[in-house]
Amino acid sequence: MNRVFNFSAGPSMLPMPVLESAAADLVNYKDAGMSVMEMSHRSPAYDAIIKAAEASLRKVMNIPDNYKVLFLQGGASTQFAAIPLNLMKTGKADYILSGQFSTKAYKEAQKYGDVVAVASSKDDNFSHVPATTRDTFRPDADYVHMCFNNTIYGTKFNYIPDTGDIPLVADMSSCIISEPVDVTKFGVIYAGAQKNMAPAGLTVVIIREDLIGNARPETPSMLDYKLMADNDSMYNTPPCWSIYVAGLVFDWILSIGGLEEMKKMNEKKANLLYDYLDSQDYYIAPVSKESRSMMNVTFVTGVEELDKKFPKEAEKAGLVNLKGHRSVGGMRASIYNAMPYEGVEKLVEFMKEFAANNPKE
Ligand SMILES: *Cc1c(COP(=O)(O)O)cnc(C)c1O
């Protein structure tokens, strides 16, 4: 079988046991005589699937009972609007700008109220995450928004901002279920599924119950957390297939020992790559060390032609989608949960060969 190592930032690799399990049940799910793709979302068989997926996610992330789990659509980008519409009680919100997605979220929120960028690392080309203290935030802000892992730049918060009593809202699209996280430190966690959880189409929102029920009157029904929560994510047809696969992914994580174990595996992969980057001077890792992401690793050669050549040559070696985001250039290796250690080993080997074969002038 000719599987490649896919370093795409998203949609991205899924664990092999998950693909195999989905394939085995593809045309006839547990004697239902049909695929999950063909099933009514109101059927008992599907009801069991969505409930099991939620229960597994709760177990994986240790989500307390006073948090709702919502399975929504529209991607993380839709949450950029849903967050202010649902949480802006007085119309004030503070945003931490640590990259492109947090900036998009900030701009979207500006449509709805008094929104301030209270901290930003833009002047440093987002190569580190901004430092904050409790004094960074306006005491009367309805919430503080951050993006925990910055997919494009390859940075991650190495701390959870202390916002006191102000609810902290985190976009965790590219780091959710990569390591344990204390859910109680957050008012809302949201994530598009296609990076680390499932095929595209599903957005997971984990929200503290007391933050539900304050949506502004003009909030579209589909963005109203209360309506979604009251209907157990079944107000309309949910992304059935994606939720099913997400359930398989959550169960896979439980089967390997949960997020503690997942973190160890992810650290081992990231360390292999960063240790190599730190040991040589052909490639440059532009991100400051203390802000390094465990999921998205960015590097450049410093020579434009070589940066162009690298992903093309890598593809021939079965290492695909290593081109950096169009806005930053260079290379990016996204090494989410499903990327095997072997894939990163192969990448480092390839990097060494490429450096030897392509000396800089
Ligand atoms: C990919 C990504 C998004 C956008 O997600 P969509 O599901 O495509 O809307 C937002 N935030 C982060 C951190 C991402 O990595």
Image (cartoon, rainbow, N blue to C red):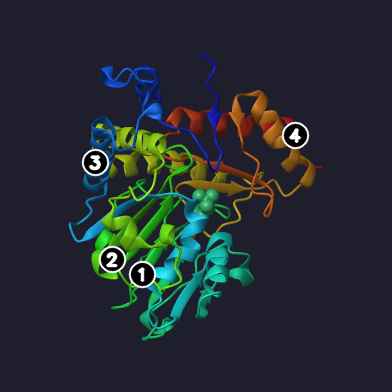
Q: Nearer the viewer, residue 233 or 185?
A: 233
What residue did someone put label 3 on?
51
Q: In the figure, residue 92 lies in which quadrant? A: bottom left
Res. 358 mark:
4
What residue did someone put label 1 on?
168
Tell me the amino acid under the disc marked 4. Answer: Asn
Q: Does residue 317 lie above or below 290 as drawn?
A: above
| Disc 2 crowd, CA 10 A, few/some/many (<14, 14-19, 20+) | some
Tell me the amino acid under the disc marked 1. Answer: Leu
Q: Nearer the viewer, mark 3 or mark 1?
A: 3
Measure how far apart labels 3 and 4 are at the Cα level. 53 Å
| Disc 3 crowd, CA 10 A, few/some/many (<14, 14-19, 20+) | some
Label 1: element kind: strand
Q: Please indicate, yes or no, whether residue 98 appears anywhere in the rendered image.
A: no
In which quadrant of the rendered image does the C terminus lie? top right
Give percent across and percent down for residue 91.
Answer: 44, 81
Label 2 close to label 1 by CB (< 8 Å): yes
Question: Within 8 Å of ligand 1, the CB of disc 2?
Answer: no
Label 4: element kind: loop
Left/right placement of residue 123 relative to residue 43 reads: right
Give percent across and percent down for residue 86.
Answer: 39, 69
**Quick one: label 3 or label 2, which is nearer the N terminus?**
3
Measure how far apart labels 4 and 2 are at the Cα level. 48 Å
Give percent across and percent down for residue 329.
Answer: 69, 50
Measure how far apart labels 2 and 1 are at the Cα level. 7 Å
The residue at 26%/49% (across/down) is 61
The residue at 31%/63% (across/down) is 226
Tell me the amino acid under the disc marked 3. Answer: Lys
**Quick one: label 2 or label 1, which is nearer the N terminus?**
1
Label 3: element kind: helix
What residue did someone put label 2 on?
185
Label 2: element kind: helix
